[in-house]
C-alpha cells in the first residue's frame, strides 16, 4: 500500500498528463490498506485524503455513464466526498489532531472555492478545534467572529495559520471587514510564534520531532481501532510513525510561510482600507510588498519541486498584481 502511495504521489507530481496514473495508484493503495487493515483503520483515511488531493489537483470534469445516463462528474466533487470520508475515519480512529484538522481545512478550501461560504466557515471552525482550539472557536453566530480567550494547546500549530487565513477570506467575501481583520491578525500571530520557536529551539511548534506527548496526541495516545466484525482493537499510534509518506499534513517550507505572510498582509490592507483606515492599510501593503520581494529571493534559493515552484511563482505574481491595483501610490514601493 505504501509503495502504491509513493507511486501515486510521484505520478501526480510529474504533470497533468500523468494525473490519471496517480489516481489509479492511489485507488490501489486505498484498496490494499482497506483489505489488509480494515476499512476503519486510520491509514485508510490517510490514503483517501491522498487520493482526494490528486483529484483536487487534476480539477477536471468527466462524463461518466451511470446506468445508461451520461452524467458530468467534477473532480472537486470527488475530492470533497473523499475528504469527508477520510475525516470520518480519522475522527473515529484517532480523534482531534493535526491530521483531522488538515483534512477539515481542505474541505473548507473546497467549499470556499465553490462559494459555499457557510459550509466553508463550518469546516474551518471544526479544523480550528481539531488542531487544539476550543470547540466552535470560530463563533459564527456572534457579532464578532473572533477567537475565544480560552485557546487550547494546539492553538499555534503551524497549519492554524492556513486555517485562519481561510476564515479571513470567507469573512472578506461577506464584507465583514472587522472580523476578517481579527482573523488575519491571528494568522500573523501564529507565524510569529512559530518563527520565534524555530529561532530558539530550531523546530516548529508541535513538529514531529517534539518529544512532548501532550503536543503530539495523535502520535502517542493509544488508539481504538473498530474492526469489521464490530469489535474494538486497541493499538499504539506510535507504531504508525514509520509510515511517513502517508502523513497528510504537509511539511511547510520557509517559502510557503513567507507567501502566506505576504498574502495575509495584502488581505489585511484591503480590510483596513475598507474600514477607512488608510494609514494602517498603507503600512500593511508596504509590508506585503516587502515580504513578497523576499518570496522571490526564496523562490530562487529554496529546494522545492518544479510543481511547488510554479505554484509559488503564480501566487507571487498575483500578489504583485493586486498590490499594483491598490490605491497606494507606486512611490511607496521603491525598487
Image (cartoon, rainbow, N blue to C red):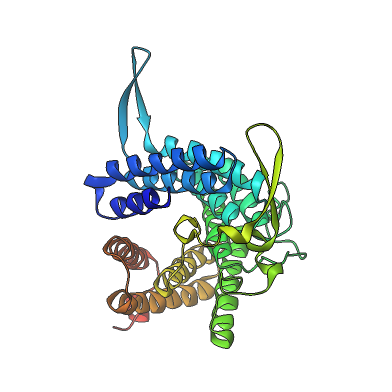
Residue 237: where, in percent of width, then height?
A: 63, 57
Q: From this viewpoint, which residue is outermost toward the top?
A: 68
Q: Is residue 112 above or below residue 151?
A: above
Between 314 and 206, the residue placed more toward the observer is 206
For image coordinates 41% across by 39% down, the residue present is: 76
Q: From this viewpoint, which residue is outermost toward the left?
A: 17
Q: From this viewpoint, which residue is outermost toward the bottom?
A: 200
Give residue 131's quadrant in the image.
bottom right
Between 86 and 113, the residue placed more toward the observer is 86
Q: Is residue 83 left or right of residue 230?
A: left
Q: Is residue 222 left or right of residue 206?
A: right
Q: Give the total of numbered labels.
A: 0
- Report whether residue 59 is seen: no
Between 123 and 34, the residue placed more toward the observer is 34
Q: Is residue 98 above or below residue 54?
A: below
Q: In this view, does 242 lie to the left or right of 321?
A: right
Give residue 285's quadrant in the image.
bottom left
Residue 130: where, in percent of width, then height?
A: 65, 55
Q: From this viewpoint, which residue is outermost toward the right?
A: 150
- Report whether residue 252 is seen: yes
Rendered-image quadrant of the C terminus: bottom left
Q: Is residue 158 above or below residue 333?
A: above
Residue 284: where, in percent of width, then height?
A: 49, 74
Residue 57: where, in percent of width, then height?
A: 35, 48
For image coordinates 52% across by 76% down, the residue present is: 279
Amino acid at each position: 500500500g505504501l509503495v502504491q502511495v509513493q507511486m501515486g504521489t510521484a505520478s501526480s507530481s510529474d504533470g497533468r498528463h500523468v494525473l490519471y496514473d496517480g489516481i489509479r495508484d492511489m485507488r490501489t493503495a486505498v484498496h490494499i490498506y482497506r483489505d489488509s487493515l480494515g476499512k476503519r483503520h486510520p491509514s485508510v483515511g490517510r490514503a483517501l485524503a491522498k487520493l482526494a488531493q490528486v483529484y483536487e489537483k487534476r480539477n477536471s470534469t468527466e462524463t461518466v455513464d451511470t446506468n445508461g445516463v451520461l452524467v458530468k462528474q467534477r473532480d472537486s466533487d470527488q475530492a470533497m466526498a473523499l475528504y469527508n470520508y477520510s475525516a470520518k475515519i480519522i475522527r473515529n480512529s484517532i480523534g482531534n489532531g493535526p491530521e483531522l484538522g488538515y483534512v477539515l481545512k481542505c474541505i473548507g478550501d473546497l467549499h470556499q472555492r465553490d462559494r459555499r461560504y457557510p459550509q466553508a466557515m463550518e469546516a474551518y471552525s471544526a479544523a480550528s478545534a481539531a488542531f487544539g482550539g476550543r470547540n466552535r472557536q470560530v463563533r459564527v453566530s456572534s457579532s464578532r467572529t473572533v477567537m475565544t480567550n480560552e485557546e487550547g494547546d494546539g492553538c499555534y500549530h503551524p497549519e492554524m495559520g492556513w486555517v485562519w487565513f481561510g476564515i479571513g477570506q470567507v469573512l472578506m467575501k461577506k464584507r465583514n471587514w472587522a472580523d476578517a481583520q481579527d482573523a488575519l491578525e491571528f494568522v500573523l500571530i501564529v507565524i510569529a510564534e512559530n518563527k520565534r520557536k524555530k529561532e530558539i529551539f530550531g523546530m516548529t511548534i508541535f513538529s514531529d520531532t517534539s518529544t512532548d506527548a501532550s503536543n503530539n496526541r495523535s502520535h502517542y495516545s493509544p488508539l481504538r481501532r473498530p474492526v469489521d466484525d464490530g469489535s474494538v482493537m486497541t493499538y499504539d499510534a506510535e507504531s504508525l510513525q514509520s509510515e511517513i509518506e502517508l502523513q497528510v499534513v504537509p511539511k511547510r517550507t520557509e517559502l510557503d510561510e513567507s507567501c502566506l505572510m505576504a498574502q495575509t498582509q495584502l488581505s489585511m490592507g484591503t480590510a483596513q482600507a475598507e474600514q477607512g483606515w488608510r494609514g494602517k492599510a498603507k503600512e500593511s501593503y508596504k509590508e506585503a510588498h516587502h515580504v513578497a520581494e523576499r518570496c522571490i529571493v526564496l523562490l530562487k534559493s529554496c529546494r522545492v519541486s518544479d510543481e511547488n515552484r510554479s505554484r509559488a511563482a503564480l501566487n507571487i505574481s498575483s500578489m504583485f498584481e493586486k498590490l499594483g491595483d491598490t490605491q497606494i501610490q507606486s512611490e511607496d514601493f521603491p525598487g
